[in-house]
Structures are given as structure tokens and as C-alpha cells.
Amino acid sequence: MEGTSNKHSFILLILVLQVLLSPRVHCQLRYDFYHATCPTLPLIVRSTLLSAMALDPRIAASILRLHFHDCFANGCDGSVLLDDTSTFTGEKNALPNRNSIRGFELIDRIKYAIECVCPSTVSCADILALAAREAVNLVRNPSTSSFRLYWGAPALLGRRDGTTASLSEANQLPSPFDSLENITNKFISKGLEIKDVVVLSGAHTIGFAQCFTFKQRLFNYKGTGKSDPSLDDSLLQYLRELCPNNDSDTHLAPLDTMTPHFFDNMYYRNLVKNLGLLQTDQALMHDKTTASLVIKYSDWPGQLHFYHDFDASLGKMSLIGVLTGQQGEIRKNCRVVN
């Protein structure tokens, strides 16, 4: 165990140094990157998001997840938005993405609106990164006093769009069937750390999951023919009614059964009570390091800490493998390279 820990620490040090020493990340991404060239960008993104959320409360979580899947495969370059063609294989049909990720039409609408006023200026990668951060800001729970104390950090912008995609990397995205160790290793390989695993998992305070991602916890946990013993009895009964063993695996269940449409700290409060939906969520309570962070974020003061740390971790993730300067391109259509 000690050797593995030292190895992970060394890998993490190297990756962090690569990020810190990268001039393209620190010198070419700016909060005001489009201040002169597309000053209405934030307003367009926010207003289009608000319109979409009024019709589809799930869309905020979908956009956040889309950004995560983009960054973890080929870097935050908008590659997840590219369609397959006869000569190009994108990431949309990777196993973790197929019939799962959504929100492409919303990104198309935002891109169209931006192209009307700022043609060939704003990258699809930046649109997705900004939309994900704005989506979080728009669904922070307004009923809590910590909301009034913390309004969310701005997004660093200046990414360029990739002209390639990686189906193989998309197939290696963190999975709801992974062990905590495997997920942590995948985060470390991207320059993140175990705290980011806990913090970014907090995105599951909004959104839904298909039954197949957790059904084995209900009926055949680890091949025992029984339910997961760590699952709360009342939640087990609710989920079995929602996802019968002989029924469709595509029904949806809220990742946070208490406040599924508000970005608050209820996710962590649920984990403390064994109310986590995915086994990868509840597994955070089975490790001393991750459990201590879950407990930290689960109380009232912890919500403000969670807001702050989530914005920081989201910012770190949004720097993975970015293209800047003359790298890549500015796509005119987010679904195809120019």
C-alpha cells in the first residue's frame, strides 16, 4: 500500500508541475478573453440556458456531465460534440456516452446565437465550459443563506476546438461500476487528486441515472443474489418499485432523491445516511480520506465550503488538455471540424 501511495504521489507531482509550468494554460486563458471580441457571450449563454431549463429541469446536470465527458477524453477541446462521419470517428458512441450524454442541441443553439453576433470567434470548447459553470450557478439552492454568500467563480476562457477525437479515451471514462481506487487513478492520470474525486462527485446533487447503473445493488450485489447491505431500507424499497428486476434498465432515478434539481450539499448528507444511489457514490463513505471530506461537506457550514471547492475543482478539470493560441481551430459548427 505504501509503495502504491508513493507512486501515485509521484505521478500527481509530475502532472501538477506540467500544468503549473504550462504557459498556454496560465498566459493564454483569461477570464476576460472575449471582453472585446464578444462582450455579449455571458448573456447569450445564460439566457439560452434559462430558457432551456424552464422546459427541461434536467438540462443543467446534462450540460455539466457533457463538459466532464469532454475533458476526460482528449482534453477540454469540444471533441465530445463532434458527430461521426464516414471518415471520422467521434466520442458520442463510446460505451459511457451512447444513449446517455445529452445536451448537444442546447450547445448548438448557443453556438448559433453567438455566431450571429460574433462569427468565428468563440470556440465550442469554451461554450461548453462556460455553459457548465453557468448551469451550476443557476441551480444553486436559493433557499440557503450560503447561496447569498457565494455566487460562483468566473470561467477561464480562450480554449480552441480540437480537430480530433478519442474513442478509446472516451471508453475509459470513470464508470459507475468502477472501484473507488480505479476512479481515483483515472482522476490522478488527468492531473487531479482524491479531493477532486469527492468534490466533483458532488455534481450528483443534480441529475438522474438510468436503472442499469445501479440495479445490481438492488437485486444481485456482487453476485450474492441479495441487495447491497449498505443501502438504506427505505431507499431500497423506493428503487425496487422504480426499477423492477424484470423491467427496462433505462428508467431514470434521481441521483439525489431529496433535492434533485438544486445544486446544494444534500448529496453528501445522503451519503452519511447511506442514501447514495450509485455504488461509486456510497463508496466514498468506505474510505477514511474520502469519508472525512463527505462529512465536512454534509453540514450547514459545509455547503459554503462545497460551493467554493467545487468551483475550484471544476476550474482544474476545465484546464485538462486545453488547446490555445494557434492550436486547433474555432469551429463554425460544433458538430463538425471546419
Image (spheres, rainbow, N blue to C red):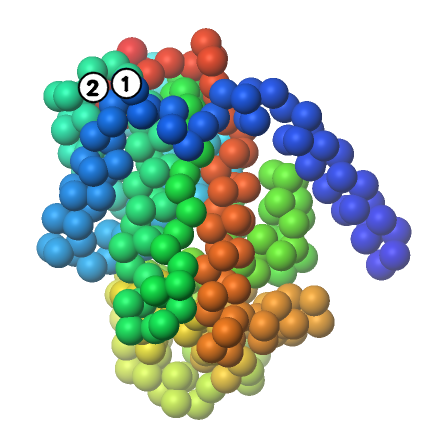
Residue 201 position in % (x across, y down) = 49, 59
- Residue under label 2: 118
Q: If the image is split into quadrants, where does the N terminus sit?
A: bottom right
Residue type, label 2:
Cys
Q: Is residue 208 left or right of residue 199?
A: left
Tag 1 secondary structure:
loop
Please tell me which residue is depicted at 64% across the width and 31% down the height of the picture.
19
Q: Quarter-wise, where is residue 83 in the image?
A: top left
Q: Which residue is mark 1?
A: 37
Q: Does residue 201 appear in this view?
A: no
- Residue appearing at x 19%, y 26% in the figure: 114
- Indicate which disc residue 89 carries: none
Q: Mark 1 and mark 2 in contact? Answer it, CB < 8 Å.
A: yes
Residue placed most toward the observer, 322 or 145: 145
- First of labels 1, 2 by sequence position: 1
In three-dimensional space, the C-alpha distance between marks 1 and 2, rounded to whole angstroms, equals 7 Å
Q: Is residue 225 above or below residue 316?
A: below
Judge whether residue 13 can be spotted in this image.
yes
Rendered-image quadrant of the C terminus: top left
Q: Residue at x 53, y 80 (%)?
A: 272
* Picture layout, residue 274 above or below residue 204: below
Residue 63 is situated, as x and y percent measured from the top left of the image, at: 31, 46
